């Protein structure tokens, strides 16, 4: 996990390594894309990892052996960018050849899931999703 900070005024890019564990699909609250974000999330095999981008600390939620996490989408709890919310993540279970949709509290990633929705089929690897807040 690397953090890149760009400075358009000077045309420079600074990079910092936040973690050396392998990972993919890094995400932030989509409302903060291209802006300063306090937290980011990425998939690391059988776990989802939440990074505090200021202190460079990480909290992981492991899904257990044979369960592979996909990309997580952030679903905000309110209108505050970077505020509280849930992480929605597809989790493939090799033992059943099916997937679950895990709903995790983004601020308490080490806690048990808020909900687990058992799907009747496998969601293919490579599936990507976003959260869109509906309006009235």
Image (cartoon, rainbow, N blue to C red):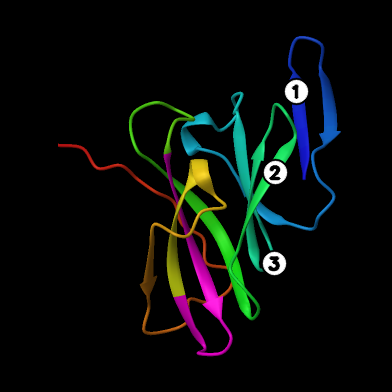
Dot 1, crowdedness within 10 Å: few (<14), some or many (≥20)? few
Do the residues bearing badges 1 and 2 touch, measured as CB atoms within 8 Å? no
Q: Could you tell me residue 81's position as x and y percent?
A: 44, 28
Point out residue 131 in the picture as x, y percentages from the top left corner.
Answer: 39, 48
Mark seen at residue 58:
2
Residue under the image location 70 percent in, 43 percent down: 58
Residue tagged 3? 45
Query: Which quarter shows the N terminus?
Result: top right
State left or right for residue 91 relative to residue 100.
Answer: right
Q: Which of marks 2 and 3 is nearer the N terminus?
A: 3
Q: Main secondary structure of the magenta part?
A: strand
Residue at image point 66% right, 68% down: 46
Residue at the far left: name it: 136
Callouts 3 and 1 close, C-beta under 8 Å: no
* Dot placed on the residue nearer the N-terminal end, 3 or 1: 1
Would you name the residue on which mark 1 appears? Answer: 6
The quarter holding residue 64 reads: bottom right
Mark 3 neighbour class, 10 Å CA radius: few under 14, some 14 to 19, many 20 or more: many
| Residue 2 rendering spot, x and y as whole percentages | 79, 40
């Amino acid at each position: 996990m690397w953090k890149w900070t760009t400075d358009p005024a000077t045309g420079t890019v600074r990079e910092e390594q936040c973690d050396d564990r392998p990972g993919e699909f890094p995400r932030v609250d989509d409302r903060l894309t291209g802006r300063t974000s306090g937290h980011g999330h990425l998939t690391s095999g059988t776990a989802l990892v939440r990074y505090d981008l200021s202190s460079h600390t990480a909290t992981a939620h492991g899904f257990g052996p044979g369960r592979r996490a996909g990309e997580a989408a952030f679903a905000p709890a309110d209108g505050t960018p970077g505020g509280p919310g849930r992480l929605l993540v597809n989790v493939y279970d090799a033992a059943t050849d099916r997937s679950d949709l895990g709903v995790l509290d983004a601020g308490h990633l080490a806690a048990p899931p808020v909900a687990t929705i058992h799907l009747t089929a496998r969601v293919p690897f490579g599936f990507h999703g976003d959260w869109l807040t509906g309006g009235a």
